[in-house]
Image (tube, rainbow, N blue to C red):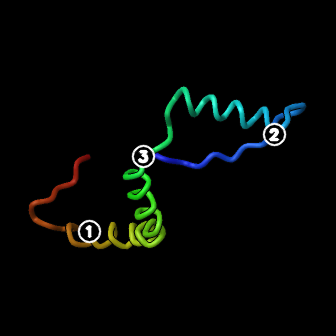
């Protein structure tokens, strides 16, 4: 799993204090992926938009194919 963190210092907190809290959290929980995981993540990010654009088309193609198929029934 991976993600992005966007944060701003709270009222009365400077940027350095925020960064120190984030560094401590990162050190204690270990959420930093290794080199191989990062490589795979970068490959996936490059194709994420085209893949997600195709999901509705693929779903409709499958639904049309199986609609009325003799081995497929509808559960109530």
Q: Residue 34, labelled with which disc?
A: 3
**Other residues around mark 1 within 10 Å, as few (<14) / some (14–19) / many (≥20):** few
Mark-to-mark CA distance, 1 and 3: 37 Å
The mark total stands at 3
* Depicted 28 relative to depicted 39: above or below: above
Q: Would residue 31 be found to the left or right of residue 64 on screen?
A: right
Which of pointers 3 and 2 lies earlier in the amino acid sequence? 2
Q: Residue at x 72, y 37 (%)?
A: 19
Q: Residue at x 20, y 67 (%)?
A: 66
- Helix, strand or loop status at disc 3: loop
Residue farthest toward the right in the current orientation of the protein: 12
Q: Would residue 74 be found to the left or right of residue 56 on screen?
A: left
Where, by quadrant of the figure, is residue 9 drawn? top right
Q: Residue at x 33, y 66 (%)?
A: 59
Which of pointers 1 and 3 lies earlier in the amino acid sequence? 3
Q: Nearer the viewer, residue 4 or 16?
A: 16
Residue farthest toward the top in the current orientation of the protein: 28
Q: Residue 15, labelled with which disc?
A: 2
Q: Would residue 74 be found to the left or right of residue 18 on screen?
A: left
**Other residues around mark 2 within 10 Å, as few (<14) / some (14–19) / many (≥20):** few
Q: Residue 22 placed where, x, y %? A: 66, 34
Indicate which label's residue lies in the foreground, 1 or 3. 3
* Depicted 17 relative to depicted 50: above or below: above
Q: Residue 62, labelled with which disc?
A: 1
**Other residues around mark 3 within 10 Å, as few (<14) / some (14–19) / many (≥20):** few
Where does the N terminus fall, quadrant-wise? top left
Q: Residue 27 placed where, x, y %? A: 56, 30
Which of pointers 2 and 1 lies earlier in the amino acid sequence? 2
């Amino acid at each position: 799993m991976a993600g992005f963190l966007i944060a701003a210092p709270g009222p009365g907190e400077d940027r350095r204090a925020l960064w120190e809290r984030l560094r401590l959290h990162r050190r204690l929980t270990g959420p930093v992926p290794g080199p191989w995981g990062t490589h795979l993540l970068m490959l996936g990010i490059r194709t994420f938009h085209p893949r997600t654009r195709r999901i509705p088309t693929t779903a409709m193609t499958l639904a049309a194919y199986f609609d009325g198929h003799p081995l497929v029934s509808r559960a109530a």
